[in-house]
Image (tube, rainbow, N blue to C red):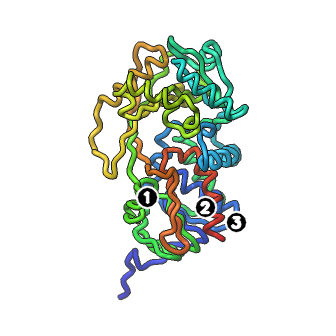
Amino acid sequence: MTSHLPWDTSLDAADLVVVGAGIVGLAHAADAVARGLSVVVVERDERAVGASVRNFGHGCFTAQDGRALRYAMAARTAWLRLAGEAGFRLDESGTVVVARAGDEYAVLREFAAARDGQAVLLDARQVAERVPVGPGVVGGAWLPMDVRVDPRQAVHAIAAWLAGQGVRFHWATSAHLVEPGLVTTSRGRIRAGHVVMAVGHDVDRHFPGLAERAGLRRCVLRMLRVADPHGRRVEPAVLSGFSLLRYGGFAACPTRPALRARLESEHPELTGIGLNLMFTQRPDGDLTIGDTHAYAVTPEPFGADELDRHVLAETARLLGAERLAVRERWRGVYASAPDPFLIATPMPGVRVVSVTSGIGMTTALGLAPEVLDDLLA
Protein backbone atom coordinates (compact mmCIF):
# COMPACT_ATOMS: atom_id res chain seq x y z
CA MET A 1 0.00 0.00 0.00
CA THR A 2 1.30 3.46 -0.88
CA SER A 3 1.62 5.90 2.03
CA HIS A 4 0.20 9.37 1.34
CA LEU A 5 1.86 11.49 3.99
CA PRO A 6 1.13 15.26 3.99
CA TRP A 7 4.74 16.15 3.21
CA ASP A 8 4.70 13.83 0.20
CA THR A 9 1.68 15.44 -1.42
CA SER A 10 1.46 18.21 -3.95
CA LEU A 11 -0.77 20.91 -2.45
CA ASP A 12 -0.63 23.69 -5.02
CA ALA A 13 1.48 25.65 -7.49
CA ALA A 14 1.73 29.32 -8.47
CA ASP A 15 3.93 31.92 -10.10
CA LEU A 16 4.34 33.56 -6.69
CA VAL A 17 3.97 31.97 -3.27
CA VAL A 18 3.68 34.43 -0.39
CA VAL A 19 4.24 33.18 3.14
CA GLY A 20 2.38 35.42 5.58
CA ALA A 21 -1.04 37.08 5.22
CA GLY A 22 -0.33 40.28 7.13
CA ILE A 23 -0.24 43.59 5.29
CA VAL A 24 3.28 43.00 3.90
CA GLY A 25 2.31 39.65 2.44
CA LEU A 26 -1.00 40.95 1.10
CA ALA A 27 0.77 43.91 -0.49
CA HIS A 28 2.97 41.54 -2.50
CA ALA A 29 -0.03 39.41 -3.43
CA ALA A 30 -1.97 42.45 -4.62
CA ASP A 31 0.87 43.74 -6.76
CA ALA A 32 1.47 40.28 -8.23
CA VAL A 33 -2.20 40.00 -9.19
CA ALA A 34 -1.97 43.37 -10.93
CA ARG A 35 0.90 41.92 -12.99
CA GLY A 36 -1.23 38.97 -14.06
CA LEU A 37 0.61 36.37 -11.96
CA SER A 38 -0.98 33.39 -10.24
CA VAL A 39 -0.60 33.73 -6.47
CA VAL A 40 -0.83 31.44 -3.46
CA VAL A 41 -0.70 32.77 0.11
CA VAL A 42 0.26 30.53 3.03
CA GLU A 43 -0.70 31.67 6.53
CA ARG A 44 -0.13 29.74 9.73
CA ASP A 45 -3.25 31.13 11.46
CA GLU A 46 -6.89 30.94 10.44
CA ARG A 47 -6.78 34.65 9.64
CA ALA A 48 -4.38 37.56 10.13
CA VAL A 49 -4.04 38.17 13.87
CA GLY A 50 -0.63 39.83 14.20
CA ALA A 51 0.69 43.37 13.97
CA SER A 52 -1.45 44.15 10.91
CA VAL A 53 -4.65 44.07 12.95
CA ARG A 54 -3.30 45.28 16.31
CA ASN A 55 -2.29 48.80 15.27
CA PHE A 56 -3.81 52.28 15.07
CA GLY A 57 -4.91 51.93 11.45
CA HIS A 58 -2.91 55.07 10.75
CA GLY A 59 -1.36 55.72 7.36
CA CYS A 60 1.34 57.99 8.77
CA PHE A 61 2.79 58.96 5.39
CA THR A 62 3.94 62.52 5.96
CA ALA A 63 6.16 61.92 8.99
CA GLN A 64 8.46 59.49 7.16
CA ASP A 65 11.78 60.25 5.47
CA GLY A 66 14.15 58.67 2.94
CA ARG A 67 13.11 55.30 1.57
CA ALA A 68 10.22 55.13 3.99
CA LEU A 69 8.78 58.37 2.60
CA ARG A 70 9.06 57.06 -0.96
CA TYR A 71 7.33 53.81 -0.06
CA ALA A 72 4.72 55.67 2.00
CA MET A 73 3.67 58.03 -0.79
CA ALA A 74 3.36 55.14 -3.24
CA ALA A 75 1.40 53.22 -0.60
CA ARG A 76 -1.02 56.11 -0.16
CA THR A 77 -2.10 55.80 -3.80
CA ALA A 78 -2.45 52.03 -3.42
CA TRP A 79 -4.52 52.35 -0.22
CA LEU A 80 -6.96 54.71 -1.95
CA ARG A 81 -7.34 52.31 -4.86
CA LEU A 82 -7.69 49.21 -2.69
CA ALA A 83 -10.30 50.82 -0.46
CA GLY A 84 -12.52 51.28 -3.48
CA GLU A 85 -11.85 47.86 -4.95
CA ALA A 86 -12.03 45.83 -1.73
CA GLY A 87 -14.84 47.88 -0.19
CA PHE A 88 -13.44 48.96 3.16
CA ARG A 89 -13.65 52.36 4.78
CA LEU A 90 -10.72 54.75 4.41
CA ASP A 91 -10.78 58.27 5.84
CA GLU A 92 -8.60 60.95 4.24
CA SER A 93 -8.75 62.89 7.50
CA GLY A 94 -5.07 63.58 8.04
CA THR A 95 -3.21 63.78 11.33
CA VAL A 96 -3.17 66.48 13.98
CA VAL A 97 0.08 66.76 15.94
CA VAL A 98 -0.64 68.48 19.25
CA ALA A 99 2.10 70.71 20.71
CA ARG A 100 1.89 71.34 24.44
CA ALA A 101 5.17 73.20 24.76
CA GLY A 102 7.09 75.78 22.80
CA ASP A 103 9.87 73.39 21.81
CA GLU A 104 7.33 70.96 20.35
CA TYR A 105 5.81 73.75 18.29
CA ALA A 106 9.29 74.81 17.16
CA VAL A 107 9.90 71.34 15.71
CA LEU A 108 6.56 71.47 13.90
CA ARG A 109 7.35 74.93 12.51
CA GLU A 110 10.65 73.65 11.09
CA PHE A 111 8.98 70.55 9.70
CA ALA A 112 6.24 72.56 7.99
CA ALA A 113 8.81 74.89 6.42
CA ALA A 114 10.79 71.92 5.07
CA ARG A 115 7.79 70.02 3.68
CA ASP A 116 6.16 72.83 1.67
CA GLY A 117 2.44 72.26 2.11
CA GLN A 118 2.51 68.76 3.56
CA ALA A 119 2.08 70.21 7.07
CA VAL A 120 -0.15 73.13 8.03
CA LEU A 121 0.58 74.94 11.29
CA LEU A 122 -2.34 75.38 13.69
CA ASP A 123 -2.85 77.68 16.64
CA ALA A 124 -4.31 76.39 19.92
CA ARG A 125 -7.88 77.28 18.91
CA GLN A 126 -7.57 75.49 15.57
CA VAL A 127 -6.22 72.37 17.30
CA ALA A 128 -9.18 72.35 19.72
CA GLU A 129 -11.62 72.69 16.81
CA ARG A 130 -10.24 69.54 15.19
CA VAL A 131 -9.57 67.24 18.16
CA PRO A 132 -10.48 67.05 21.86
CA VAL A 133 -7.55 68.20 23.99
CA GLY A 134 -6.92 69.26 27.55
CA PRO A 135 -5.40 72.51 28.77
CA GLY A 136 -1.88 73.65 27.97
CA VAL A 137 -1.98 73.30 24.17
CA VAL A 138 0.11 75.98 22.45
CA GLY A 139 -0.57 74.92 18.86
CA GLY A 140 0.02 72.05 16.50
CA ALA A 141 0.13 70.95 12.90
CA TRP A 142 -2.23 69.22 10.52
CA LEU A 143 -0.76 66.64 8.12
CA PRO A 144 -3.52 66.45 5.47
CA MET A 145 -2.13 63.57 3.38
CA ASP A 146 -2.38 60.94 6.13
CA VAL A 147 -5.27 58.47 6.18
CA ARG A 148 -7.03 56.13 8.58
CA VAL A 149 -8.54 52.66 8.22
CA ASP A 150 -9.94 50.17 10.68
CA PRO A 151 -7.12 47.56 10.77
CA ARG A 152 -9.47 44.94 12.20
CA GLN A 153 -11.58 45.20 9.04
CA ALA A 154 -9.29 46.45 6.25
CA VAL A 155 -6.74 43.62 6.28
CA HIS A 156 -9.44 40.95 6.16
CA ALA A 157 -11.27 42.86 3.41
CA ILE A 158 -8.12 42.95 1.29
CA ALA A 159 -7.64 39.19 1.74
CA ALA A 160 -11.26 38.52 0.77
CA TRP A 161 -10.94 40.74 -2.29
CA LEU A 162 -7.73 38.99 -3.34
CA ALA A 163 -9.47 35.63 -3.01
CA GLY A 164 -12.10 36.99 -5.38
CA GLN A 165 -9.31 37.86 -7.82
CA GLY A 166 -8.17 34.24 -7.87
CA VAL A 167 -5.53 34.26 -5.12
CA ARG A 168 -5.60 30.93 -3.30
CA PHE A 169 -5.20 31.15 0.47
CA HIS A 170 -4.05 28.21 2.58
CA TRP A 171 -5.03 29.28 6.09
CA ALA A 172 -3.92 27.43 9.24
CA THR A 173 -0.96 26.15 7.23
CA SER A 174 2.65 26.47 8.38
CA ALA A 175 5.61 26.84 6.04
CA HIS A 176 8.23 24.32 7.18
CA LEU A 177 10.88 24.52 4.47
CA VAL A 178 11.63 26.99 1.68
CA GLU A 179 13.79 26.03 -1.28
CA PRO A 180 14.20 27.52 -4.76
CA GLY A 181 10.94 26.71 -6.51
CA LEU A 182 9.35 24.91 -3.56
CA VAL A 183 7.61 25.65 -0.26
CA THR A 184 6.96 22.64 1.95
CA THR A 185 4.07 23.23 4.34
CA SER A 186 2.21 21.38 7.06
CA ARG A 187 -0.39 20.40 4.43
CA GLY A 188 1.85 19.56 1.50
CA ARG A 189 4.26 20.97 -1.07
CA ILE A 190 3.65 24.06 -3.16
CA ARG A 191 5.58 24.57 -6.38
CA ALA A 192 6.62 28.18 -6.70
CA GLY A 193 7.99 30.26 -9.53
CA HIS A 194 9.12 32.75 -6.89
CA VAL A 195 8.68 33.06 -3.12
CA VAL A 196 8.20 36.04 -0.81
CA MET A 197 8.65 35.34 2.90
CA ALA A 198 6.61 38.03 4.70
CA VAL A 199 6.64 36.58 8.20
CA GLY A 200 7.22 39.79 10.17
CA HIS A 201 9.19 39.32 13.36
CA ASP A 202 9.52 35.56 12.79
CA VAL A 203 12.28 35.80 10.19
CA ASP A 204 14.56 34.09 12.71
CA ARG A 205 12.26 31.05 12.79
CA HIS A 206 13.12 30.41 9.13
CA PHE A 207 16.48 32.12 8.54
CA PRO A 208 18.19 32.61 11.92
CA GLY A 209 21.56 33.57 10.48
CA LEU A 210 20.00 36.22 8.28
CA ALA A 211 18.05 37.63 11.25
CA GLU A 212 21.19 37.76 13.40
CA ARG A 213 23.17 39.59 10.73
CA ALA A 214 20.36 42.11 10.35
CA GLY A 215 20.19 42.68 14.11
CA LEU A 216 16.52 41.75 14.14
CA ARG A 217 14.67 41.91 17.44
CA ARG A 218 11.03 41.94 18.48
CA CYS A 219 9.44 45.18 19.57
CA VAL A 220 6.59 44.71 22.04
CA LEU A 221 3.91 47.38 22.35
CA ARG A 222 1.24 47.97 24.96
CA MET A 223 -2.03 49.31 23.51
CA LEU A 224 -5.55 49.81 24.81
CA ARG A 225 -9.06 50.55 23.61
CA VAL A 226 -10.94 53.02 25.79
CA ALA A 227 -14.34 54.67 25.79
CA ASP A 228 -14.25 58.18 24.34
CA PRO A 229 -14.65 60.46 27.40
CA HIS A 230 -16.07 63.34 25.31
CA GLY A 231 -18.48 61.51 22.98
CA ARG A 232 -17.08 63.49 20.07
CA ARG A 233 -16.28 62.43 16.53
CA VAL A 234 -12.49 62.58 16.04
CA GLU A 235 -11.66 62.49 12.35
CA PRO A 236 -7.83 62.74 12.29
CA ALA A 237 -5.24 60.58 13.94
CA VAL A 238 -3.72 62.45 16.90
CA LEU A 239 0.00 62.58 17.72
CA SER A 240 1.80 64.37 20.54
CA GLY A 241 5.20 65.83 21.36
CA PHE A 242 6.44 62.35 22.27
CA SER A 243 5.63 61.28 18.69
CA LEU A 244 8.12 63.82 17.37
CA LEU A 245 10.91 61.66 18.80
CA ARG A 246 9.79 58.53 16.98
CA TYR A 247 9.26 59.43 13.31
CA GLY A 248 12.12 59.92 10.87
CA GLY A 249 10.60 62.94 9.17
CA PHE A 250 11.18 65.07 12.25
CA ALA A 251 14.80 63.99 12.71
CA ALA A 252 16.19 66.72 10.45
CA CYS A 253 14.52 69.50 12.45
CA PRO A 254 17.31 71.48 14.17
CA THR A 255 15.39 71.90 17.44
CA ARG A 256 14.48 68.24 17.92
CA PRO A 257 17.60 67.37 19.98
CA ALA A 258 16.65 70.04 22.50
CA LEU A 259 13.11 68.66 22.65
CA ARG A 260 14.45 65.17 23.25
CA ALA A 261 16.73 66.41 26.02
CA ARG A 262 13.86 68.22 27.72
CA LEU A 263 11.46 65.27 27.57
CA GLU A 264 14.14 62.86 28.78
CA SER A 265 14.94 65.19 31.68
CA GLU A 266 11.35 65.94 32.70
CA HIS A 267 9.78 62.54 31.89
CA PRO A 268 12.46 59.83 32.10
CA GLU A 269 9.85 57.24 33.05
CA LEU A 270 7.94 57.93 29.81
CA THR A 271 10.84 58.23 27.38
CA GLY A 272 12.35 55.15 29.06
CA ILE A 273 9.36 53.04 27.99
CA GLY A 274 9.43 54.50 24.47
CA LEU A 275 6.08 56.24 24.82
CA ASN A 276 4.53 57.36 21.55
CA LEU A 277 1.51 59.15 22.96
CA MET A 278 -1.18 59.04 20.27
CA PHE A 279 -4.70 57.87 19.54
CA THR A 280 -7.17 57.15 16.76
CA GLN A 281 -10.91 56.69 16.94
CA ARG A 282 -12.56 53.42 15.97
CA PRO A 283 -15.81 53.29 13.93
CA ASP A 284 -17.79 52.62 17.13
CA GLY A 285 -16.44 55.79 18.76
CA ASP A 286 -13.96 54.15 21.12
CA LEU A 287 -10.34 55.29 21.05
CA THR A 288 -7.27 53.16 20.34
CA ILE A 289 -4.52 54.57 22.53
CA GLY A 290 -0.85 53.85 23.10
CA ASP A 291 1.82 52.91 22.85
CA THR A 292 5.01 51.77 24.59
CA HIS A 293 8.06 50.05 23.09
CA ALA A 294 10.34 47.34 24.50
CA TYR A 295 12.94 45.44 22.47
CA ALA A 296 14.32 41.91 22.75
CA VAL A 297 15.03 38.91 20.55
CA THR A 298 12.90 36.88 22.98
CA PRO A 299 10.58 39.21 24.92
CA GLU A 300 9.52 38.39 28.45
CA PRO A 301 6.01 36.91 28.45
CA PHE A 302 5.00 39.05 31.44
CA GLY A 303 3.72 42.61 31.03
CA ALA A 304 3.99 45.17 33.81
CA ASP A 305 0.71 46.90 34.61
CA GLU A 306 2.74 50.07 35.09
CA LEU A 307 3.00 50.42 31.31
CA ASP A 308 -0.76 50.55 30.89
CA ARG A 309 -1.06 52.99 33.80
CA HIS A 310 1.38 55.37 32.11
CA VAL A 311 -0.48 55.19 28.79
CA LEU A 312 -3.85 55.76 30.46
CA ALA A 313 -2.64 58.65 32.62
CA GLU A 314 -0.88 60.47 29.79
CA THR A 315 -3.75 59.96 27.35
CA ALA A 316 -6.22 61.26 29.92
CA ARG A 317 -4.03 64.32 30.40
CA LEU A 318 -3.81 64.88 26.64
CA LEU A 319 -7.61 64.60 26.35
CA GLY A 320 -8.31 66.67 29.45
CA ALA A 321 -10.26 63.77 31.00
CA GLU A 322 -10.32 62.74 34.65
CA ARG A 323 -10.11 59.04 33.85
CA LEU A 324 -10.55 56.59 30.98
CA ALA A 325 -12.69 53.44 30.91
CA VAL A 326 -10.75 50.50 29.43
CA ARG A 327 -12.57 48.19 27.00
CA GLU A 328 -9.63 46.06 25.79
CA ARG A 329 -5.88 45.64 26.34
CA TRP A 330 -3.41 43.91 24.06
CA ARG A 331 0.21 43.42 23.20
CA GLY A 332 1.46 44.14 19.72
CA VAL A 333 4.70 42.69 18.37
CA TYR A 334 6.62 43.77 15.29
CA ALA A 335 10.09 43.26 13.85
CA SER A 336 12.75 45.85 14.68
CA ALA A 337 16.26 46.31 13.29
CA PRO A 338 18.75 49.13 12.68
CA ASP A 339 17.69 49.32 9.04
CA PRO A 340 13.95 50.12 8.79
CA PHE A 341 13.45 47.55 6.01
CA LEU A 342 14.80 44.03 5.76
CA ILE A 343 14.87 42.86 2.15
CA ALA A 344 17.12 39.85 1.61
CA THR A 345 17.80 37.08 -0.91
CA PRO A 346 18.66 33.92 1.06
CA MET A 347 18.51 31.79 -2.10
CA PRO A 348 17.63 32.22 -5.79
CA GLY A 349 14.02 33.17 -6.44
CA VAL A 350 13.29 33.88 -2.75
CA ARG A 351 12.96 37.23 -1.00
CA VAL A 352 12.62 37.78 2.72
CA VAL A 353 10.74 41.02 3.33
CA SER A 354 10.05 42.56 6.72
CA VAL A 355 9.27 46.14 7.70
CA THR A 356 11.55 46.48 10.73
CA SER A 357 10.39 49.88 11.96
CA GLY A 358 6.74 49.56 12.97
CA ILE A 359 5.40 51.25 9.82
CA GLY A 360 4.17 48.26 7.83
CA MET A 361 0.66 49.64 7.36
CA THR A 362 2.18 52.90 6.16
CA THR A 363 4.75 51.54 3.69
CA ALA A 364 4.04 47.93 2.64
CA LEU A 365 1.86 48.74 -0.36
CA GLY A 366 4.62 50.96 -1.74
CA LEU A 367 7.47 48.63 -0.84
CA ALA A 368 6.01 45.51 -2.53
CA PRO A 369 6.15 46.73 -6.16
CA GLU A 370 9.86 47.52 -5.84
CA VAL A 371 10.57 44.10 -4.32
CA LEU A 372 8.70 42.35 -7.12
CA ASP A 373 10.40 44.45 -9.79
CA ASP A 374 13.71 43.06 -8.52
CA LEU A 375 12.50 39.51 -7.85
CA LEU A 376 10.90 39.09 -11.28
CA ALA A 377 13.65 40.78 -13.28
Judged by depth in the image, the label closer to the viewer, 3 or 2, is: 2
Residue 39 appears in the picture as rendered:
yes
Q: Secondary structure at mark 2?
A: helix
Image coords of residue 206 (percent x, y):
40, 65
Most extreme residue toward the right is 117
**Residue at 54% over, 41% down:** 151
Q: Residues within 10 Å of mark 2 (few under 14, many from 20)?
A: some
Q: Secondary structure at mark 1?
A: helix
Q: Are marks 1 and 3 in contact (CB under 8 Å)?
A: no
Residue underneath mark 1? 214
Identify the image quadrant of residue 79: top right
Q: Would residue 147 be found to the left or right of residue 294 on screen?
A: right
Image coords of residue 70 (percent x, y):
65, 48
Query: Which disc is residue 371 wearing?
Result: 2
In front of the other: 40 or 336: 336
Q: Would residue 273 be found to the left or right of residue 47 on screen?
A: left
**Dot placed on the residue nearer the N-terminal end, 3 or 2:** 3
Q: Please say if 52 is above or below 173.
A: above
Residue underneath mark 3? 36
**Dot placed on the residue nearer the N-terminal end, 1 or 3:** 3
Give the residue type at disc 1: Ala
Give the residue type at disc 2: Val
Q: Residues within 10 Å of mark 1 (few under 14, many from 20)?
A: some
